[in-house]
Every structure is written in C-alpha cells, then in structure tokens.
Image (tube, coloured by chain):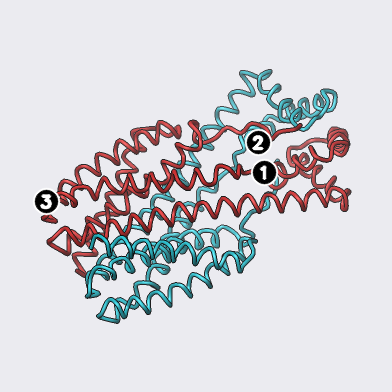
Chain colours: A red, B cyan
Amino acid sequence: MPASPHVEKHFTSGETVRDVVIGMSDGLTVPFALAAGLSGAVAGTSIIVTAGLAEIAAGSIAMGLGGYLAARSDAEHYASERRREEREVIEKTEVEREEVREVFRAYGLAEETIAPVVAALEAKPKAWVDFMMRFELGLEEPDPKRALASALTIAIAYIVGGLVPLGPYLFLHEAPRALVVSVISTLLALLVFGFLKGRFTGAPPVRSALQTTLVGGLAAAAAFGLAKLFG
Amino acid sequence: MPASPHVEKHFTSGETVRDVVIGMSDGLTVPFALAAGLSGAVAGTSIIVTAGLAEIAAGSIAMGLGGYLAARSDAEHYASERRREEREVIEKTEVEREEVREVFRAYGLAEETIAPVVAALEAKPKAWVDFMMRFELGLEEPDPKRALASALTIAIAYIVGGLVPLGPYLFLHEAPRALVVSVISTLLALLVFGFLKGRFTGAPPVRSALQTTLVGGLAAAAAFGLAKLFG
C-alpha cells in the first residue's frame, strides 16, 4: 500500500499549533486595532465592547466556518482530480506515461533510466495514480476529519486572542484608560505569541516576536488615526 | 537546468486571482458583520462608519502586511532548507541516497529500478537537491518578488470588499435603513463573488455562491445578535 511519502512541515509541532497560530494572529490583531481605533473617537467603553464582541463573533465565524468550507472544497478537489487521474491512466495511458517521463526529465535523467520506472508504475495502477497526484499535480491527500477540528481550533483561538485586547474595556469605563491597559497587555501578548510562533515554526523567535508585534501595532495605529480623522 | 516540474494549481487563473479572493472574502464578510452588529446597538451611523473604517484599516494591514511577512518567512525557510540539503548530499551522501530510495519504495518500485535513478541524481548534485526539495520535503520555491504584489493585492481587495457593506452607512444617516441597504447589497455581492470564485477555483459555482453568502450572512447575524444582547 503506497502511502504518500513523508513530508516535513513548516510547522514542526503539527496542525493544531498551526491552527492556533492562524486564529490567534488575527484575533490578537484585528479586535485590538478596532478597539484602539474606536478609543480615538468615543469616550465611553460600552460601544467599544459592543463593536469588539461583534467583531470577534464575525471574525471567528468567517475564519472558522470559511476555513471549514475551504478544507471541504480541497478534499473534494483532491477526490475529483484523483478520479480524473484514475481514468486517464486507463484511457490515455501513453499521455500519462509521457507525463511521468517529463517529471524525471526535469531532473536530467536519461530515457533508459526513466523507462523501468514508468514500467514499474504501470504495473501498479494505484501506486501510479498516487505518484501522479503528488509528483505531477503536487496535491497532498487532505484529511477530511481534520476539517472540523481545524475550524473549531481556529475559531476558539481567534476568540481567546480577541478577548486580550477587549478585556480592559470590559472592566474600565473610560476609553482612554482602557486603551492604555489594552495597548500594553496586547503588545506584550503579541511579543510572547510571536516568540512562541517563531519557536514552533522554526523562524528566529526574536524576529518573529518583533514582526508580530509590528503588524499588530501598525494595524492599531492606523485604525486609531483613521478613527480620529473621521470620528 | 532542471526546473521544478509544472504543478497544476487549484486556482487555474493564477496567483492574482487567488489573492483577490483571499482579500475580498474577508473584506466582504467581517466589515459587513461588524456594521450589521453595531446597527443592532446604535441608532446613528457615524459611529458605525468610524468602526467600519477602523476595521477595514486594521484588517487590510493585518492581512496584507501579515501575508507579506509570512511570504518572506517562507522564502527564507525554503532557502535555509535548500542550504541544508546542499550540505547533506555532500556530507551525508548515503543517508540522502536512502531518502531517495524511500521516496520510490513508497510507490512499490523494486531496488533494481531505483538504483539507476539514485545514481543518475548523484551525478547531478543540483538536480538532486531540486529533487529532494520537492519530493522529500514537498517544498516549492517561492517567488520573492510575488510577496509585495501579493500583499498589496490582498490589502486592496480587502478594502474594496469592505466598502461594499460600509457604503450605505456613509450616505444614509439612520442605522436601520442603512442596514437594510447594506444587507441587500452585500448579500448580492457575496453571491456574485462566490459564483466567480467557484468559476476561478474549479468548484461548482452555484454552491460556491451559496456557501460564501452563508458564511457572510451567519457572521453578520451572529454579530447582530451579540450586539443586541450586549449593546
């Protein structure tokens, strides 16, 4: 049973970490920037809390449900491409043989080295289709069971991330004071999160921490400036 | 000069379309939901316009700049993995030979078919590294020049998408009336966008239209409900 060859991932600690990173990156950034922006325009915190919760609900649904549907589409795309390849190795055998040869010619292999590989694949139609899916089309078989877990992980990470910048507005009733606490705690959270993200993804952690904080800080500053201008 | 083998993409019409889809999906959805949510809590539109513009600024920066930095990290990750492979084919030649054999054993090829392929790759170290990058690690060489264009495309698509739901609030001064116009025009835009997205990505267009509209509609409904509850 030829399984797909092992693929080393960018995210060495698995898909759940990747999903947490995706959800929390945006969750820490966008609600933070929205709350900061509104703080430049209104004095009370209740409208900021309302807008922040609405944003967190919308963002987590858009990312979670959107991601779930995209993953399902990927799985269907893979299945339909696979059926096409299964037909083609039977109906257009010579075309598919030539496609295998093309894959290897790209690496400078001679025809007499390629021919036995083509013959060996032809003898095992399932392995041949596996080979074409991965080496010609560059498609990995998606795990359909991951889609739901992945969607929920992303959505929850977005909500948890979003509550960090919004928290101070829940407890303090003057926007300027809540803004100060929110900026300090969220920038710290972005630094820690960026550092851990770097550790898990193999990027230099300090630079990852600074980059993540920069994106969040810039987004918040732009939102604040724009809201001051139009508020 | 062995180039990477041609890879058929999910998005048949290229990377720009993909970037527009990424930016506009979120741009149509999240500002829509935020504006709808706030319409459930406030009567005037000025605060909704402020919040909407702040959100669009934050979202486009988070997606654009975040995407740009992620693309740069991918390019660096590819370069560092490539350097590692270049070292390993020299320093750990037998380990790397065995890794090539493993790739082909997974497809049921016999040792005597594999051996000439290994020998041929070994004779061309650059092609060998190309092969390992793609077939062992599953990494495509990123185009560093794409990163900036991609970031700008995503950010602009987000802004254009976000102005659709926000537009009515700019011209109408009562939130309930603006909400009605915003809901109708955004749901129509989501239907059209989802349909075109399906056409470009190869998914069934009608289903893509309905799914895209469902995500946007659910996000908006949840934000509206939450804001009513807390507003």
Amino acid type, residue under disc 1 in the picture: Ser
Q: Are marks 2 and 1 in contact (CB under 8 Å)?
A: yes
Q: Chain of mark 2?
A: B
Same-subunit check for callouts 3 and 2: no
Q: Is residue A67 visible?
A: yes
Instruction: Count residues near mark 1 (Cα–Cα under 10 Å), then give few for <14, some for 14-19, many for 20+.
Output: some
Answer with the quarter of the image where residue B73 lies. Answer: top left
Instruction: Count residues near mark 3 (Cα–Cα under 10 Å), then give few for <14, some for 14-19, many for 20+.
Output: some
Q: CA distance from mark 1 to mark 3?
A: 55 Å
Relative to B203, say whether A72 is above or below. above
Relative to B201, say whether B71 is above or below. above
- Give the residue drawn at x 25%, y 43%: A187
Q: How far across and how far down the image is residue A91, in percent?
A: 88, 53
Q: Residue furthest front?
A: B229
Residue assigned mark 1: B4
Q: How far across and how far down the image is residue A226, in percent?
A: 24, 64
- Give the residue drawn at x 25%, y 68%: B41
Q: CA distance from mark 2 to mark 1?
A: 7 Å
Residue assigned mark 3: A177
